[in-house]
Each structure stands twice: as C-alpha cells, then as structure tokens.
Image (cartoon, grey):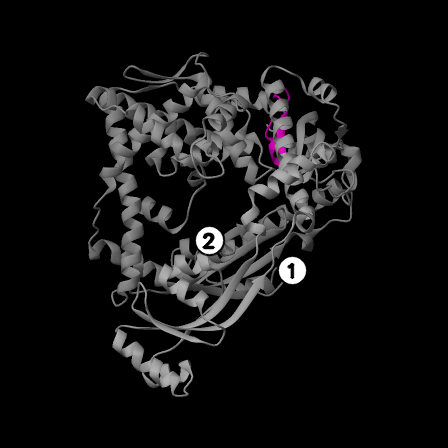
Amino acid sequence: MLSVFRRFIRSKFGAIFAILFLGVIAGAFILGDLSSGRYGTSMGGGGTAAKAGGEKLSQNELQDRVQRVFENARRSNPGLQIAQFFAQGGGTQVYDQLVASLTLKAFADDQGVHVSKRLVDAQIAQIPAFQDAAGNFSQDNFRQLLIRERLTEQSLRDDISREILQRQLLGPIGLGVKLSDSLVLPYASLLLEARQGTVAAIPAIAFLDDKNPTDAQLADYYKRSADRYTIPEQRRIRYALIDAERFAQASQPSDAEIAAAYNQNKTAYAAKQNRSIEQLVLPTEAGAKAIADQVKGGKTLAAAAQGAGLAVSAVADQSREALTASASKAVADAAFAAKQGELVGPVRGSLGWLLLRVTSVNDTPARPLAAVRGEIVTTLRAQKEKQLLTDFTGKLEDQIANGGTFDEVVKDNGLKLETSPLLVATGKQVEDQAYVAPDDIKPLLTPVFAMSADDDAQLIPITPDKRYALAAPSDIVAAAPPPLAKIKSLVLTQYKLNQGNEKAKKLAEQIQTKVAKGMKLADAIAGAGIKLPPPQTLGGRRADIMRGEQRPPAEVAILFSMAPNTVKTLPIGQDRGYFVVQLNAIQRGDAKDQPALLAQVRDQLGQVVGEEYGQQFERAVEKELGVTRNAAAIANVRKALAATNSGDQ
C-alpha cells in the first residue's frame, strides 16, 4: 500500500504514457498517434513480442508504438533522447500497456464480449481531428487525415475497439471503492506532518584546482560526459509559401457578380427604422391601466413603476423583426405605431401586460448599389480568395497523395522554394544564438521535426484561410556532441568542476559520519578546514511544500523520507557539490478534525485503489490465459530505435 500512497502524493514518469491502461483518455491517445505524423500501424512481422490466447503482439507493432509515444513525449520536451526515454522506463511501460490491451482483448473474446461497428463509429465521430468547422463528422477530413498520416482505417478501428473493451472491462472494477476512515486518516495526517532540518551546502567551486588536466584526461572526461554536451537534432526546413494574395487578381468580382450580391441582400440595404423603448411588465391588465393613468396624470413611467415597487427596463435600437422575436408581434406593432415620447398600452405580451414608451426613433435610409459597392467588393473578394486558396491547397494535397515529390509539386505549381538554416526544434540556431526564426517558420517547426526524412511534404497552416506552407525536412543532423576542440574551454571548466564535485562528495561523507556520531553539523562545517557556507534551517508542512504541481527543492523533500535523528548526503546536481542534510524534528499531523481534507484524500486514494484493482484484475487474467512475453522484446526495440533515431542513443 505504500506504493499506492507514493503515487498519490507524487506523479511518476509513467503517468505521461498512461494512455492505453484504463482507457481514460482514448481520444488523446488516438490523436497523439495521428498527430505524430511519422509512422502508420505496423502490419506485423519481425517476431512475436507477446502472445495472449489467439492474440499476438508483433515486434514491429511494439516498435511502432514505442516510436510514436517517444515522438509525442518529445513534442513537449524537444531535447528528449531515445536513450533517456528508455532509461526512464518509457519503453517498458508502453510494452506493459500493449500487453494489457492484448490480454483483455483475448479475455473479451473468450467471454464472448465484442465491440460493435456502430460503437466504434460513434467514437470516431467524436474525435475533433475528423470534424468540420461546425463540429460534425467529415468523411473527407477522415480520409484525408488517414492518407496523410499513412494509417489504415482498420488499424484505427482496432485501436479504438481495444480501448472500448478496456473501458468496459476495467471501468466497473474501480467503481464504488469506499475506503474506511481508519485507512484514510493516516495518509491525510501525513499531509499535515511538518519537519525541520539543517542543511549544509558543500559547493564544488570551493575545491577548484588551478592546475589544468592533460589532453588525455580531458578527452577521456569528454567521452564519458558526451551526453551533457550533445547538441539536439538539427534540421533545415524546405518550404514554399502559398498566400491568398496569390489570387488577388482572379478574385476580383465582376459587375454582374456585384449586382447579383446586391440583389440577393436587398433587404439588408433597404430603408429601415429602429426604435429604443422603455417598458414595464405587469401581471394584470388592471395594474397596467392604473400605472398608465398615473403617467397620463403627469408622472414619468419610471416614477410610477417605482411607486408600485417595480422597475422599468430599456431596450435599445430594436428593429421591428427583433422586437417581434423577443416580445411578440402585438408589442412590436404597438411600439412601431407610436410616436416618440408617447405611452402605449397596456399590450398583452408573453410575460404579462406591457406599458411601452418610445424613447428614440432611428431612421436609416435605403442604400443604393453605388453606396455599398465597396463593401460588397470586399466581401466577394474575400470569399473568392478563400475558395481559390482552398481549391489550390486541395490540388497540392491531391498531388502529394498521388505520389508527387516536394520538388515536383513546387515546380508544377510555380511556387518559390525556400530553405531555412539548420535549426533545433525550438527554432534556435546552434551557431548563431541571436537568430530569431521568422514568423513564417515558427508554425513549421513542430510538424517538420515530427516528420521522418522520407515522409511526404505536409501542407501546414500559418494563418488559416490566408497563408499556408508546403514543408518538408531537408538536411537532418542527428543529435551529437560537437568536436572537443570547438568547446574545449567549456569542457575544461566542467572538468575542474567535476573534480571539485568529487572532493565535495568526499568531504560531505566525512561530515555525515561525524554528525551521525553526535557532532553538531555547524561544528563539523566549521572544522572542515575550508571555508564553507554556514548551515541553514529548512522545513515546512508536507501539504504546503508539495501543493499542486509544485515540487520542493530536493534538500527539503529529502527531509520527508528520513528517519528521526538521521543525516544524509545529497548531490546538488550538475557537479555543483553536495548537501549534508540532518533531520532535527518531526511534528506529527492529525486530520481527524478536518473532514474536508479527509474527503479529498478519500476521493484521491479511491481513484488510485480503483486503478490498482484494475491492474490486479489484468494480472489475474494474464495468468489465467497463460500470456507469454518475449524477454528480449524491449532490448530489441531499444536497439532498433537507437539506430532509427540516430544520435539519440
């Protein structure tokens, strides 16, 4: 149960990839695959990674899915490398999720549980990527997106079917979890626990050596620390801009089109009258007549209404049609038959009896064609430009879908080819830190860096309905450290810092030993034989320092994992030295008188326990079905992807 609480207190790396399991965010998973734009669903082969009943997970399918999840993770962290992804457990978690999906599919087949085509259709229709501007499912969008992303309809349907099965099978297992007060109270009380400790920093810079290392020592250090200096993948972007201004001349409307547009909208240009009124609504006709008599006697409508405990409302600049729609035809007819300042009514309305007074009359004369010609031309030109641009971009997409290369499409359509300098995924240049990516290139970075070298060019919106770019990657420079000679001064500084860090570690361990034997931390620091910063007292309440998404400094967080009266060392990070941390005091929390906190913890723990029930069920099914796993599956995928993602190893 301790592992449950750890996940409750603090999210893990695996949460990023919890896409398949429990099916909570199936749409995001499907769209993540679609938006990665790199790989279609594998057709199998390459050996079997896992087998459950009659279901198999091929090595190729596993590799394909791991690549997709890696690419999606790298969207939010462009510097993420494939080796880091696997080191953090990403590949293993994707494998476990796929095996869980495979297992539950086999179990469903065994139990006669199936997902209907209609249910899958409904799920597909809810995916925003397949919807038009009005939010309705678009068959054209569906087909075009599948073609562009090189996905088959069947592979998409299979993914959705598996996700629905997981929801149906695992969802009910976690429902109705009710945890007792005796189980919730200790965890809620932990959030109120406060700890105090003393922290001393042993900085690496205190041990820097003036003596330079030999070339061999520096080269060896650089080789061992290559990941630290690795430059992220760089790409040149080839692109051709398509702007609506391209169709400025062709979109100029003719006189006949202008006249037709005027005639189709004659009512909009006809003479019209709007009126502003103040009105009072009363429940009975007799009450309305009594107020009307007071107004005729000299009172204002507002004053008469106030005397009756009512208030007048104002309606400004209303047409007859608008007033008819909001009130009724009788009310609108009465208001437009009255003179300005005249009181009208009582008139029967939808909410009661109304008294009306016209406060202003605004007459707008009819506008002839000559007066509105300019605005009609502007509207028609914009409409034609948009349509011509849509037709042209559709033609480009068709050419690409039919096998046209980037160069062929650019040449055949008279586009101007442009190429960016080498850029990293953030739009920066390695060689020129002052470089700022032009506005036309910024929208291209994410989609182009998600493409592989042999992917088809993509049409990417820069300003929707106005400006697009046909883009594809050109030169791709794999992530790799630069030559040592190029950054020798930086590596030399880091080498000395690293050596100082080793000395700081040794001293920190010596101080830890002394403090553990009873010496005060401040005395141990003072007697270290080198000038060090004085210790500081730190701490706080667990709930306060771990609120929301914020994470406390490591030297504070470690206090909550220490036993009373103990001392630990902790690296500061990046070869900057070490902390010596001593836990001084623990103030226990008690949440028994905080029902809101108990309820919150009960809900959150209930979700975690429900998830654990689902995991236990899946493991039981896996055991029952005799699911087999290929022990070398992840190692094989890692090796293959290290080669595919050259430089990310």
Query: Which residue is depicted at the point 31% across and 61% down?
Result: 597
In x, y percent, where is residue 180? Answer: 19, 54
Which kind of residue does numbered mark 1 sit on? Gly
Taking 55 as reference, is 329 above or below it? Answer: below
Q: Which of disc 2 and disc 1 is earlier in sequence?
A: 1
Q: Nearer the viewer, residue 234 or 326?
A: 326
The stretch of residues the image draws in magenta is 445-460
User: Judging from the image, what secondary structure is the residue with disc 2 in?
Assistant: loop
> Left of 606 or right of it: where is 154?
right
Residue drawn at x 51%, y 26% is: 145
Tell me if mark 2 has few (under 14), some (14-19) or many (20+) residues whose alpha carbon lies within 10 angstroms of its own. few
Secondary structure under the numbered disc 1 in the rendered image: loop
Q: Which picture quadrant has residue 127? A: top left
Q: Pick whichever, 450 or 626, lies toward us.
A: 450
Verify CB contact (< 8 Å) between mark 1 and mark 2.
no
Where is the N terminus found, in terms of image quarters? top left
Q: Which disc, if any, is residue 590?
A: none
Q: Give the image quarter of residue 168.
A: top left
Instruction: Verify whether residue 29 appears in magenta.
Output: no
Query: Which residue matches tag 1?
Result: 529
Q: Nearer the viewer, residue 244 or 117?
A: 244
> Measured along the vertical axis of the image, is residue 619 above or below residue 577?
above
Disc 1 crowd rating (10 Å Cα; few below 14, some 14-19, many 20+) is: few
Can you tell which mark lies on residue 549?
Answer: 2
Residue 294 in sight from this viewpoint: yes
Q: Is residue 443 visible?
A: no
Name the kind of residue labelled 2 in the image. Glu
Label 1 to label 2, Cα distance in Å?
Answer: 41 Å
Among all residues in the image, which is located at the extreme bottom?
A: 298
Image coordinates of residue 29 in percent, x first then y, are 43, 33
Camera-nearest residue between 314 and 446: 314
